[in-house]
Image (cartoon, rainbow, N blue to C red):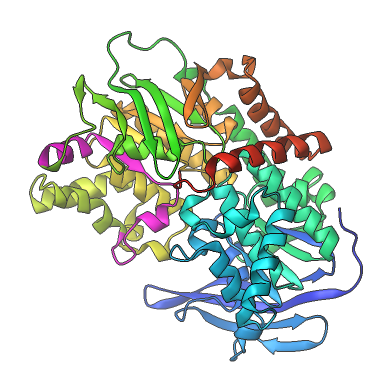
Amino acid sequence: MPQHKGNTVMAVQDLQVAYYDNGHYSTVLNKLSFTIERGEIVALLGESGSGKSTIAKAVMGLLPPSVRIDSGTLLLNDSEIMPLATGIEWGRIRGRRIGMLFQDARLALNPLMKIKAQFIESLTYHKLASARQAVEIGAELLEKLGFSQPRKVLESYPFELSGGMCQRVCLALAVSLQPDLLIADEPTSALDTVSQMEVLDLLANLQRVLDLSILFITHDLAVASAISNRVIVLNKGVIEEEGATDSVLSQPTTSYTHSLLTARERLTVTSASENQGALSASAPLLEVKGLSKAFAQPVLHKVDFALHEKEIVGVLGQSGCGKSTLVRCIAGLEQPDEGVIMYGGEEISRLKGKRRREYCQRLQLIFQDARASLNARRTALQLVQEPLNYFKLGLREDRMRTAKMYLNEVGITGELQQRLPAQLSTGQCQRIAIARALVLSPKVLLCDEVVSALDMSVQSQIIELLQRLHKKFGFSIVMISHDIRVLRAFCHKIAVMQEGSFCEVREASDIDQSLLPHTQQLLKCSVDMEAGLLTAAMKEVAVASVCETERELVGKGGS
């Protein structure tokens, strides 16, 4: 871990921020103060809604106009004192002095610009290089970050790269400006364990080479243990405790920190035994046969898949292996190039118009980023009513009654039903997305990484919610996740995907007995992440694996 050098890069003093909510302001950060020293990696831990991202946005000048900064001072390099409530020339600070690495790298990149153009735009804006020099700087940084074909990456658009590759591109863009401080806001939460280890390794190496200070925002204790040497635990806008990572995570002094530690254990021991056992031997409810899909290059190749009534099947695989493309094809958002999708014995992959819409009621997809999938201008109640309005199911009063019932089922009650997505936490938005999917009484629920962006306690709540609803309503579930703990605790079977096809399908309780090298690698990475280990051997495995994936993915469509 980096050593504390006694030279303060950034200090935040008495930061108090309030959000406008239903006619009045509510304080979300309360007189918060902390420092980051040169060469230090500080992990900011806390549950969803604790104020972690608000801190990052405040010191980057990215808070929306409706947010009020009541007090707060930002010090950079012990010299400059800037009240955050007054006008600051953010153009000379943002990116150049404080870099930002966002959670969803693909959304952080301009989808209409090649990677090369984004390096040129960033470096020329800050007058650090000419256009020609910017391309060379980009190629050099991408090569250092593990890309075997950096020139080809520079000529690619963001959608042609996997999530892990986009995250490395964003990291290269951030460090190209040589900032004093890098803020990394949940940069690994949407990545598989192999890609997580790779990004953490790259960040640690950059920190050592550039003497870079990093504020690493995360809800994952294993990630915090692996990357940081100091931890700040945040709870409802107040610092609960802070100190050396090993000390805080092994011997917490507050009940809140202890609850964060036990939340991971609760998820691990969630009763999977209730989900095990023989299911109906009848014909599959949903069946995929020989499914292939290509963009510029193949993404899915001859995929065969079956889902029985009331069955829960998990799909495990690395970033870019085709998991999301598979469920998008099943949901009708992508048209397969070859193969068929059968529902109840009828082919649905070629249906269009009214017939296709009928099956949309039976196959519902829940997206990874719940907030982004919800209309920001509609309340929770309006959002859940919307599918009923679209399909003209029942009278207006019945639709409202049904929407309220499903919102109550997922724990969105009372005045929360009248709130907009921006006024709710990420976990609450995910609950609304679940209610919105269930309001049509589907037979199959397609869950695409529905808990990866959530903190451990909320993950447990959402998994337990899905288990309860599955038991009550009896729908089948396809659960995509890169987290083996989630799949082991929740699913009947786990299908392991590699390079666009399934390499094996096993009982969830039996997944640890797999002899397949690819599955063993995923399991080992998960175990090492849980232990907070980044051994040299695993780093080599991670880099080799991602480089191989990169060769397959560069130039093809996103998956």
Residue 46, visible in the rendered structure: no
- Per the rendered image, the range of residues in magenta is 354-379
Residue 97, visible in the rendered structure: yes
Q: Position of residue 128 (x, y in %)?
A: 70, 80
Question: Is 358 in the magenta?
Answer: yes
Where, by quadrant of the figure, is residue 176 drawn? Answer: bottom right
- Work out whether 206 lies above or below 311: below
- Work out whether 484 lies above or below 161: above
Q: Residue at x 40, y 25 (%)?
A: 303
- Left or right position of 121 against 540: left
Question: Is 168 in the magenta?
Answer: no
Where, by quadrant of the figure, is residue 186 drawn? Answer: bottom right
Q: Residue at x 30, y 20 (%)?
A: 309
Task: State the residue in front, 151 or 376.
Answer: 151
Q: Position of residue 328 (x, y in %)?
A: 35, 40
Q: Position of residue 24 (x, y in %)?
A: 42, 78
Q: Residue at x 58, y 79 (%)?
A: 61
